[in-house]
Amino acid sequence: MTGYYNKFDIAKGLLYTPQDTLKAIQNEEKYRNNVWLGRIIKLMLRGFRKWSRIAVVSGLKGLNPFTSDKDAVEHGYYDYRKTKEFSMFRNMVATELGINEAYFREDILKKYAVIQEMYRDNPKALEALELTVEGFFHDNSTNLTLEVLGNEQMKKLIEGLKEHPEYESLLKQVVLYQDKFGTAVVDAHHAMIRSFLEKDYLGRGFTAPEQKKGSVFLLPPPKQGEFVAVSTEQGLVQVEVKEKDGWKYYQLPGETEAVLHRYIGTEKNLSLPTSINGIPVQSIGSAALMDAPVNTLTIDAAYWTKERLNPAHLRTSGEQASAIHWLNLSEQQKNQLKENKNWAEEIQEKIEMQKQVKNIAELTEAAYHGNLPKELAVRIGNEYATIKAEENYYACSILDENLNIVATDSYNDMSVSISVALADVLEEAGLSGKQAELVDYEKLQKKMQLEKQKEITKESPKKINKSQEIGR
């Protein structure tokens, strides 16, 4: 990945520039075959687009989408990076990439920025950098263990050396790099530095593993498939994932109930368990059924809550939405099912929409033979949609039958083609792409200008020449 030399760069990117980092991971060849990772990244990028749309709409309504006062904006506003969903997905990505949670610490990343400057002309050294259990930086290419000391810490070190003049000459050996602010990169293996770190800096709050003196204790990567990072009200926690009857599940610390994490079995007619391994089931994870080849789902009324029945939780890998059968429903719940749209119908609509919008991408690819333009326009029934590639985003508009703009949107994922971006925007807008027809973008723009002129000058429609009609 260009500019992403190691785990520190990826961790920093996921914290500060998550969209660019996710796209870079998505485009990296060695990760393309990781279907699970790809799905997580796609869900995260969709979350950013949702936030972006809410911000645009709020701004058009005269609201401030960036205020901390949520009452000042429309319902549904949030900064996606601050949501529990983002934290959960970010840590799932980190686990798939073998990145330990310690790499996300801001103090570690600030120190890394200094080492990054030190190695600015040596990217291979950056690639070889890893974090030790003490929070030091180990360079595998030179076998150096590095630590970053701030200006005040360097002053304290130099002050201490005044009492031992015989050691002052060693300072040049231990300080490997120093910036204009007095922040220094030092050799953490050197006896003098280790002594300083032990007494004044680490404070011995850390207990080193029992290994040979002078060994480097690198942080192990998170255990793949055995642990998962979960966002709670108390913060992120690592929980052990266990397996039973095709289900992966976990328990939060102090909890007596289980959460269904993923279904990896092969049952096509699946019943959601109300208990697993003798533990009551609390809820089902949002991606638990994502890879499940399920045709029918049987659900006990114990699952009857709005959160547990979110359609996203019941999405499976099947072409058709799973048929849902309920057990032990109360009369009130039965009546509610009759009044509300069935969850399975809602899922099926989404699947059908995805099939329909593919028509746009296929139509466009065929018309332009893979050499896609920077602007596209389609007609869907009496409505139109346009998309134009700007420098860092796609600008989209939805037009009514009179060519009035009724909605605008921005699509920030420039890694996808313009046709796929338009299809995705239409899906989000609830427009069916099944009957979409390509129209000439330039002629549509001219037609829009003529319609505006007619409105202003009250010009007769008869004056519009047939050559100005829209078509390809």
Image (cartoon, grey):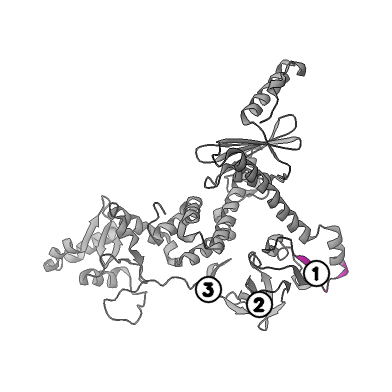
Residue interval drawn in magenta = 321-331
Residue lying at 64% horizontally and 31% vertically, measured from the top left? 440
Q: Quadrant of residue 99?
A: bottom left
Sooner in the amino-acid sequence: mark 1 or mark 3:
3
- Please say whether residue 64 is visible from this viewpoint: no
Amino acid type for the residue under numbered disc 2: Glu
- Measured Cα–Cα span from mark 1 to mark 3: 32 Å
Estimate the x, y position of residue 85 in percent, counting from the top left: 59, 60
- Which residue is the site of mark 3? 227
* 66 to 35, vertically: above or below: above
Sooner in the amino-acid sequence: mark 3 or mark 2:
3
Sooner in the amino-acid sequence: mark 1 or mark 2:
2
Q: Quadrant of residue 197?
A: bottom left
Amino acid type for the residue under numbered disc 1: His
In the rendered structure, find residue 325 and report the number of the disc placed on it: 1
- Which residue is the site of mark 2? 257
- Measured Cα–Cα span from mark 3 to mark 2: 17 Å
Q: Nearer the viewer, residue 72 or 380?
A: 380
Estimate the x, y position of residue 87 in percent, counting from the top left: 54, 61
Question: Do the numbered discs 1 and 2 sit on residues whose CB atoms are within 8 Å?
Answer: no
Amino acid type for the residue under numbered disc 3: Phe
Between marks 3 and 2 in the image, the one whose residue lies nearer the viewer: 3
Estimate the x, y position of residue 318 in percent, counting from the top left: 69, 63
Residue lying at 41% horizontally and 61% vertically, measured from the top left? 7
